[in-house]
């Protein structure tokens, strides 16, 4: 059962790595000393793909397929339910290949029956497989993940990528629910974002470099010494976010993810134009190292601090936060100039 063994190995290796955060240090808010609003007026309520959300946060795809992952999914579903957040499961291909492990994904729906649960499959999937994954957990949306660098580094990886875009197009055309295309830590650039939008993606989750590094994880798994240049491959989350926002041009939803477990980074991403923010690696670390209560406290702290930041920009809603002045300097600013990206056009 190599696929199932790999799931647990990913978790074990991830727990040995220190949590990391995306670098948004080039993006700066302008303090508003006269906000003219009260804290109790500040709300995090928003909507995404027709789903009404009490907060822009959601628990992003992590795992499934093994007894360990079942316990993790059950605990994460409990956290998502207590915090009122959507939750995506990890890739369901293991359960499509072996129905005996379907319970490791279905447990999320059992724990969180009223929740907005998102299905997940790789870009090798067919419309038929996608429909089975959706039905397995009564999903409200379907994630299709892209992970080329990880597959290349994986000892059992599939290095055949021809036809990916056409498969995504077929799934998006057949699915009765929104299809979200996401990376797994290497980012999405403007050119590919445009192709994904043309293929029918209802939303794009940039999942840039800054959080969990699957090249490092696969290098550890295969005992291969990857060079630092390869290990640092990928678009940083902030860069990928501006690239994808430029491609989306306000017509397609954009999700920020990849090392986003920081209230200030979350606020910056939302102010830049992101519609929602996914959190995954850091929550998993907290859950397994400190327990469910610690994770609930951490999420509530993120939301509390996000409201404070909004007030200090004079924003009572996320729509107003997207109109708050931002200064983008340093390498991120230089990148945007060279790529001819003006963020103000897409906020």
Image (spheres, rainbow, N blue to C red):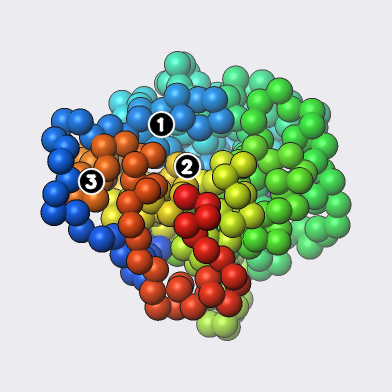
Secondary element type, mark 3: loop
The vertical placement of 300 against 329, above or below, is: above
Snapshot quadrant of residue 230: bottom right
Q: Residue at x 49, y 59 (%)?
A: 343
- Pinpoint residue 4: horizontal percent, then vertical percent: 62, 45
- Pinpoint residue 266: horizontal percent, then vertical percent: 35, 51
Q: Residues within 10 Å of mark 3 (few under 14, many from 20)?
A: many
Label whose residue precedes the other's in the sequence (1 or 2): 1
Q: Which mark is residue 275?
A: 2
Label whose residue precedes the other's in the sequence (3 or 2): 2
Q: Residues within 10 Å of mark 1 (few under 14, many from 20)?
A: some
Task: Tell me the CA gap for discs 3 and 2.
Answer: 19 Å
Residue 108 in view (yes/no): no
Task: Tell me the CA gap for discs 1 and 2.
Answer: 8 Å
Asked if residue 37 lies left or right of residue 208, the reply is left
Asked if residue 127 lies left or right of residue 303, the reply is right
Q: Residue at x 63, y 62 (%)?
A: 189
Q: Residue at x 82, y 37 (%)?
A: 170
Secondary element type, mark 1: strand
Q: Closer to the camera: disc 3 or disc 1? A: 3
Mark 1 and mark 2 in contact? Answer it, CB < 8 Å. Answer: yes
Label 1, on which residue? 46
Snapshot quadrant of residue 247: bottom right
Asked if residue 171 lies left or right of residue 230, the reply is right
Q: Closer to the camera: disc 3 or disc 2? A: 3
Q: Which mark is residue 131?
A: none
Asked if residue 97 lies left or right of residue 186, the reply is right
Which quarter of the figure is the N terminus placed in? top right
Label 3, on which residue? 314
């Amino acid at each position: 059962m190599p696929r199932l063994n790999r799931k647990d190995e990913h978790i074990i290796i991830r727990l040995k790595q220190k949590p990391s955060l995306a670098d948004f240090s080039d993006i700066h808010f302008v303090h508003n000393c006269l906000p003219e609003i009260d804290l109790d007026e500040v709300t995090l309520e928003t909507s995404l793909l027709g789903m009404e959300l009490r907060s822009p946060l959601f628990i992003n795809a992590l795992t499934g397929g093994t007894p360990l992952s079942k316990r993790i999914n059950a605990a994460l579903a409990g956290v998502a339910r207590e915090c009122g957040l959507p939750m995506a499961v990890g890739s369901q291909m293991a359960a499509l290949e072996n129905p005996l492990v379907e319970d490791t994904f279905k447990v999320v729906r059992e724990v969180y029956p009223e929740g907005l649960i998102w299905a997940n499959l790789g870009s090798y999937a067919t419309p038929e497989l996608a429909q089975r994954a959706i039905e397995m957990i009564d999903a409200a949306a379907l994630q299709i993940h892209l992970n080329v660098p990880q597959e290349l580094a994986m000892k059992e990886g599939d290095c055949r990528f021809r036809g990916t875009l056409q498969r995504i197009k077929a799934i998006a055309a057949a699915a009765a629910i929104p299809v979200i295309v996401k990376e797994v830590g290497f980012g999405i650039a403007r050119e590919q974002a445009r192709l994904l939008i043309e293929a029918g993606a209802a939303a794009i989750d940039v999942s840039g470099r800054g959080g969990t590094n699957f090249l490092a994880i696969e290098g550890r798994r295969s005992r291969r010494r990857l060079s630092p240049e390869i290990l640092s491959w990928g678009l940083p989350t902030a860069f990928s976010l501006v690239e994808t926002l430029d491609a989306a041009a306000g017509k397609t939803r954009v999700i920020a993810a990849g090392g986003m477990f920081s209230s200030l980074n979350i606020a910056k991403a939302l102010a830049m134009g992101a519609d929602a923010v996914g959190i995954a690696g850091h929550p998993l670390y907290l859950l397994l190292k400190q327990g469910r209560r610690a994770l609930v406290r951490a999420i509530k702290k993120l939301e509390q601090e996000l409201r404070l930041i909004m007030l200090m920009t004079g924003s009572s809603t996320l729509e107003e936060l997207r109109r708050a002045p931002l200064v983008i300097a340093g390498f991120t600013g230089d990148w945007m100039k060279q790529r001819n990206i003006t963020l103000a056009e897409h906020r």
